[in-house]
Amino acid sequence: MQLAVLMGFLLAASSPLLHRWFGHRTSLVLALFPAGLAAWLLLQAPEIIENGSLLLEWQWVPSLGISLTFLLDGLSLLFGLLITVMGACVLVYAGGYLKGHPDIARFHIALVAFMVSMLGLVLADGLFTLFIFWELTSITSYLLIGFNHADIDARKSARQGLFVTVAGGLALMAGLILLGIASDSWSLAEILSQEADLREHALYTPMLICLLLGAFTKSAQFPFHFWLPNAMAAPTPVSAYLHSATMVKAGIYLLARLHPELGGTVMWVGILSVVGATTMLTGAFLAIHHTNIKKLLAYSTIMALGTLTMLLGIGTEYAMTAFVTFLLAHSLYKGALFMVAGILDHETGTKDVTQMGGLRSLMPVTAIIALVAALSLAGVPPLFGFIGKELMLESVLGADSFRMLLVLFAFVASILTIAVAFIIAIRPFYGKRHHTPLEPHEAPLSMLVGPALLAVGSLLLGLMPALLGANALLTSAATSVSGETIDVALSLWYGVNVALIMSIISLGVGFLLFKRWDSVRAKLSMLAPIMRHGPEAGYEGMMNGIVQFSEWQTRLLQNGYMRNYILVMLITLIALIGNSILLRHSPIFVFDLDVRFHEVVVAGTMAMGALFATTTRSRLGAVVSVGVMGFSIALIFILFSAPDLAITQLLVETLTVILLVLVLFRLPRFSNLSTSLERIRDGSVAAMMGILICLLIMTSWSIQQFEPISTYMIENSAPLAFGRNIVNVILVDYRALDTLGEMFVLALAAIGVIAMLKLRHGESSNGKNGESSKVTTKEPYDG
């Protein structure tokens, strides 16, 4: 399986080549890959159902002990089947939807890579492996959302989705690291099987907060929900796949995977229940504001994601059963409905449901598929969505915390969702025929197969919930989520109870809301000024703030003045290194100040020379002061028995002083280029930098972790190198190649200087005697 996932990326990269071979049939060829993976997963289902889990390990780099390990249990099996089956359906659908598109090969690359990344995420056993696949889903979804890169809205939506999910990914990375530290393991299988209770660990709170931030941003929980509807800028096959089985379900998967070890605490129950219920109601409420069919479905997806999060927060056995059932039901009807939305857009040229109507006679198959899938969304029997909705209502009625709030939110959200479902199922296909930009007709077979299979699945699983071993599969998944054995026995009829009564009332009220949708939408438009100040406005404000802060920082730090650049670097160095020295060491007190009088005189002379050079207005005086510093350094070398360095310093300093005198007398006099305050500031920074260097030297002298190399040099200079001048021995023997390189560089520089002097001499010579002509910029005099 690991090799198959890695080969999936290779398949994605080779899709342009496949497009050359198979043309418009490439989508069908690529669909064989997820179909084959789904078949393999089904073959593993009996063992998973019987034994609970299967650990698949592939030695990737055996010599380094690196392996790629996948954990296959009920939860990952359910998600894996959803990803592969939906992936095959979406690929077939995309072949018809994007037929003839010039960039369909690029689309296949991103879509297959996206599918494989999501599959790797739900199967990963290692925490780091999970994080890598997590980020890959963000990157590939960014490419898919921004597929129509010529559209500015698509590019903006892609960036928004990337920023939000990657920011959450950083929090997730911190949470996974804390999880690994707290559990002393980086394997999910080991973490889930260990006896230690992570809920009692000191790192539980920060770990949970980081993990929840990662999951909430990925699964569009309030207040991070705004990026998901904007992601509808992607082609419809992407939307169908992203909403039904991938990307947004990644955060839900993470919460479900960690529920056995981290769930059940007051913090877990409180945050997931409240945030999930709020997201559920927010998505349902915002859905009825829109007439764009993809936006209607996108906000209903937010409602479903909030419902799943809320069920994980409730955490009861009934809630776990409702979670896996609702998850499967949502994937079936939402995938079908998005494909129907794509068909309507593809065949009519519009996404606005108010501009559609009377399409049933022209698109009868599409109308039937839409009706079945939408009724499943509404929770109408005998569709599978009805069973999921009943279990959800039973779960909130049996919640231990926030029961009244959850019941109220769930009831209102059900009413609004039913209205949305009727809008999608009835408004485009029934009533008066409207003029559309394109003349509508039935979609090709490739665009109908996928949604038809999903709609039939919703109907058959509703009529016969035990069909194809669904009960056994969901039992295994619910057991993985709960951490305890749960027996899922689905039924279309649970008798007359409060949940059924709530469901019937919500159906009636939802249908009435649908009938008055136009007037309700007009009245809700009065809330537009308030809604403009929601979370998305906060995101835009934050992004604008980042830009403004960057501009201010650029003007302040990168203003084109070298003096300011040096000043900032020195202050940063002083702040970081100086703080570390003062906190960790006390060099002033531990260093033995064995100083003689003549050494104090030399150091004082250097200090006075430096002070005079920075304050004098005489150019010659400044040069002399700098020279005094250099000669004082040479004197220090002599005092500490380094005559060779002293000679070098004297030669360099003498040459430097001569050159400075010759150059400075050809330059203008000193000018006031800074104010008194700026000079005080610069002087203070220079003084602090000098103190820092002094402290560094003193600290390094007082800390000796290894035996100094000088001992070896002193002992072996005469016996091994036959020289008593240790410095010379080091230069010509121990560091012979280094010295040879330095000599070569000096020789090369000398040759360059000689060449430049000769070239200059040749240019300026005049006549055979080589007399130099004066170079002037004045125009020649024409006598």
Image (spheres, grey):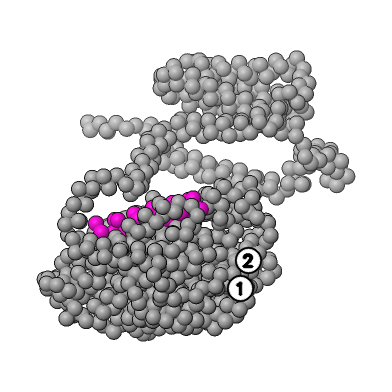
Residue 461 image offset from top left, x and y in percent: 41, 79
Q: Is residue 371 above or below residue 746?
A: below
What stretch of residues is rendered in magenta?
269-289
Q: CA distance from mark 2 to mark 1?
A: 9 Å
Residue depicted at 62% across the width and 18% down the height: 607
Q: Quadrant of the C terminus?
A: top left
Residue 713 in view of the camera: yes
Q: Is residue 83 above or below residue 683?
A: below
Q: Which residue, given by chain and number where applicable, does mark 2 sit on? A: 189
Q: Quadrant of residue 467?
A: bottom left
Q: Local crowd at mark 2 within 10 Å, few (<14), some, or many (≥20)?
A: many
Q: Is residue 80 above or below residue 695?
A: below
Q: Quadrant of residue 359?
A: bottom left
Residue 508 image offset from top left, x and y in percent: 26, 65
Q: Which SS does the magenta portion mostly show?
A: helix
Residue depicted at 23% across the width and 61% down the height: 513
Q: Which residue, given by chain and number where applicable, does mark 1 sit on? A: 53
Q: Quadrant of the N terminus?
A: bottom right
Residue depicted at 73% across the width and 19% down the height: 599
